[in-house]
Structure formats: structure tokens, C-alpha cells
Image (cartoon, helix red, strand yellow):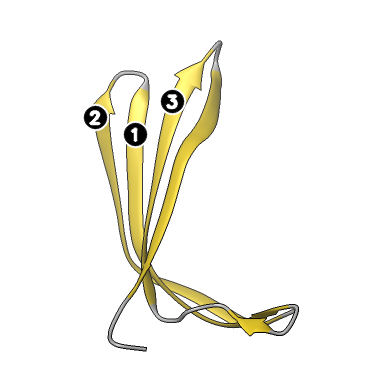
């Protein structure tokens, strides 16, 4: 269950004509079953354009702080 979710420090960088990286800071109050999703976190997503469609090929989330 997602109670709240926000993004900040959003940055987009084109690595090549068909590759882009999106980074941002995410804060959320989210439960996945009995487990709380770590928050805040730094997130990186890489996209590749294949056949005219942008596909997410990498998603990585790192908790911020010592929580």
C-alpha cells in the first residue's frame, strides 16, 4: 500500500542517441506486505530505445542514511 510518494532532485542525461539515464530522490511511505519500503532513497533508471520504444533496462534504488 502506498500512502505517500514524492520525487525531488530529478536529473535526466542522454548517454547516447538511444540511451538515457534518469536519477532522482524518492521519499515514500509504502508497505509491501508487512515490510516497509526504505525511504528516502536515491534511484537510477536507464532506458534504451529499441525499435522506437523506450524500455527500462535498469532500475536501482539505494536507501539514504543509516535506516
Which of the marked residues, 3 or 2, is nearer the chain's N terminus?
2
Label 2 near label 1: C-beta < 8 Å? yes
> In front: 47, or 17?
47
Q: Give me the residue at 30% from left, 18% from top.
A: 17
Residue 37 in picture, x, y percent from top left? 56, 77
Mark 2, residue position:
15
Which of the image's four quarters has the N terminus? bottom right
Tag shown at residue 30: none
Which of the marked residues, 1 or 2, is nearer the chain's N terminus?
2
Mark 1 vs mark 2, CA separation in Å: 5 Å
**In the rendered image of this protein, does residue 64 appear above or below residue 66?**
above
In the rendered structure, the answer to whether residue 36 lies left or right of residue 41 reads right
Which of the marked residues, 3 or 1, is nearer the chain's N terminus?
1
**In the rendered image of this protein, does residue 20 appear above or below residue 59?**
above
Q: Secondary structure at mark 3?
A: strand
Q: Give me the residue at 47% from left, 21% from top.
A: 49
> In front: 36, or 12?
36
Amino acid at each position: 500500500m502506498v500512502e505517500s510518494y514524492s520525487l525531488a532532485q530529478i536529473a535526466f542525461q542522454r548517454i547516447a542517441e538511444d540511451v538515457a539515464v534518469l536519477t532522482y530522490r524518492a521519499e515514500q511511505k509504502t508497505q509491501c506486505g508487512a515490510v516497509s519500503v526504505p525511504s528516502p532513497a536515491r534511484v537510477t533508471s536507464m532506458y534504451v530505445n529499441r525499435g522506437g520504444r523506450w524500455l527500462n533496462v535498469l532500475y536501482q534504488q539505494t536507501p539514504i542514511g543509516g535506516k
